Image (cartoon, rainbow, N blue to C red):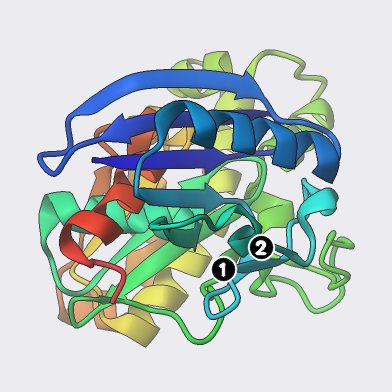
């Protein structure tokens, strides 16, 4: 049995997961706003459960050797924090970037040795499986949201300009919609994209930018499957046609070698299940 945490800027989900990936005792708490409160809350949970395998899925760049979060854009209090501080007798700790953890869960399900997982939300994240192994170095990699889409585009939180997530993130889609005096909820826009010219323009523009980065990734990795997760992915039917057209136009590898697109089956628990797979199957490579 593993005790797994999925740590986000707003909420922390945690649960115990067995070797058959049965999820038990799911809990959700608000993410503390400082490191003292965070450590206190995690230690309280560890005291309650007493599991030997403890895994953390966290939004940020992870240094694997030191189990340190080098930078977490939405949880700055975690910057340079080592999860080894939670180490106790007989505890085995694992730490993984949240998008990489979701990617591991997709690989656990599909077992396709060359595949991508892309998360659609406030930013753009993801992970890559190459020859059956999670792509990583001494730190978590695959920060695809910070691939440059424009030479001198919008300023990003990473201090670059023109990052792709500044054109595919939820906030940007809302900002673009306002230019057309559209203030409707994104769910409504995507659900009714074919019924309104403005809605279609908003959805197509998002799909075209997303298609650019997907085409680039397929050119690089020659992947056989791309899995999408995140709130926007629930509306895959709304943008899939434009996405595929853009990928076909921009990726010569896609035109030569087929690639399938899918949506994450269980996005709510993808991070937790991905962390559990590290203990259960050593899928992290």
Residue at the image point whose x is 34% and y is 57% from the top: 103
Upstream in sequence: badge 1 or badge 2: 1
How far across and how far down the image is residue 108, in percent? 17, 54
How far across and how far down the image is residue 204, in percent? 53, 42
Query: Is 206 situated above or below 67?
Result: above
How far across and how far down the image is residue 41, in percent? 67, 31
Single out the residue that lies furthest toward the front: 89
Q: Is residue 22 left or right of residue 234?
A: left
Q: Are marks 1 and 2 in contact (CB under 8 Å)?
A: yes
Quadrant of the image occupied by residue 81: bottom right
Residue 198 visible at all? yes
Q: Is residue 221 left or right of residue 179?
A: left
Residue at the image point whose x is 74% and y is 54% from the top: 166
Element assignment for label 2: loop
Write down the residue under mark 1: 144
Quadrant of the image occupied by residue 29: top right
Write down the residue under mark 2: 164
Pick the quarter of the image with the C terminus.
Answer: bottom left
Residue at the image point whose x is 75% and y is 72% from the top: 150
Choose between 110 and 133: the one closer to the eye: 133
Tag 1: Cα neighbours inside 10 Å, few (<14), some, or many (≥20)? many
Residue 250 visible at all? no
Residue at the image point whose x is 38% and y is 86% from the top: 220
The mark tally for this picture is 2
Choose between 34 and 240: the one closer to the eye: 34
Choose between 239 and 119: the one closer to the eye: 119
How far across and how far down the image is residue 13, in percent? 50, 29
Mark toward the viewer: 1 or 2: 1
């Amino acid at each position: 049995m593993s005790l797994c945490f999925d740590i986000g800027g707003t909420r922390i989900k945690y649960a115990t997961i067995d070797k058959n990936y049965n999820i038990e005792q799911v809990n959700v708490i608000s993410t503390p706003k400082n490191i003292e409160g965070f450590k206190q809350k995690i230690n309280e949970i560890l005291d309650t459960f007493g599991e030997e395998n403890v895994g953390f899925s966290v939004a940020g760049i992870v240094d694997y050797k030191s189990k340190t979060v080098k930078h977490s854009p939405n949880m700055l209090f975690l910057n340079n924090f080592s999860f080894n501080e939670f180490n106790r007798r007989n505890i085995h700790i694992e730490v993984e970037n949240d998008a990489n953890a979701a990617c591991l869960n997709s690989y656990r399900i599909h077992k396709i040795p060359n595949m991508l997982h892309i998360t659609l939300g406030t930013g753009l994240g993801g992970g890559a499986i190459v020859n059956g192994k999670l792509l990583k170095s001494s730190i978590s990699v695959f920060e695809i949201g910070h691939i440059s889409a424009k030479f001198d585009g919008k300023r990003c939180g990473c201090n670059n300009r023109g990052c792709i997530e500044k054109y595919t993130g939820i906030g940007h889609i809302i900002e673009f919609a306002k230019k057309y005096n559209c203030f409707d909820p994104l769910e409504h826009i995507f659900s009714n994209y074919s019924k309104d010219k403005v809605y279609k323009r908003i959805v197509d523009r998002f799909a075209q930018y997303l298609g650019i980065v997907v085409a680039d990734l397929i050119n690089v990795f020659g992947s056989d499957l791309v899995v999408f997760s995140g709130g926007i992915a629930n509306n895959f039917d709304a943008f899939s046609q434009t996405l595929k057209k853009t990928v076909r136009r921009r990726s010569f590898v896609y035109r030569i070698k087929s690639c399938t697109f899918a949506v994450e089956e269980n996005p709510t628990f993808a991070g937790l299940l991905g962390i559990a797979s590290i203990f259960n199957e050593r899928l992290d490579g």
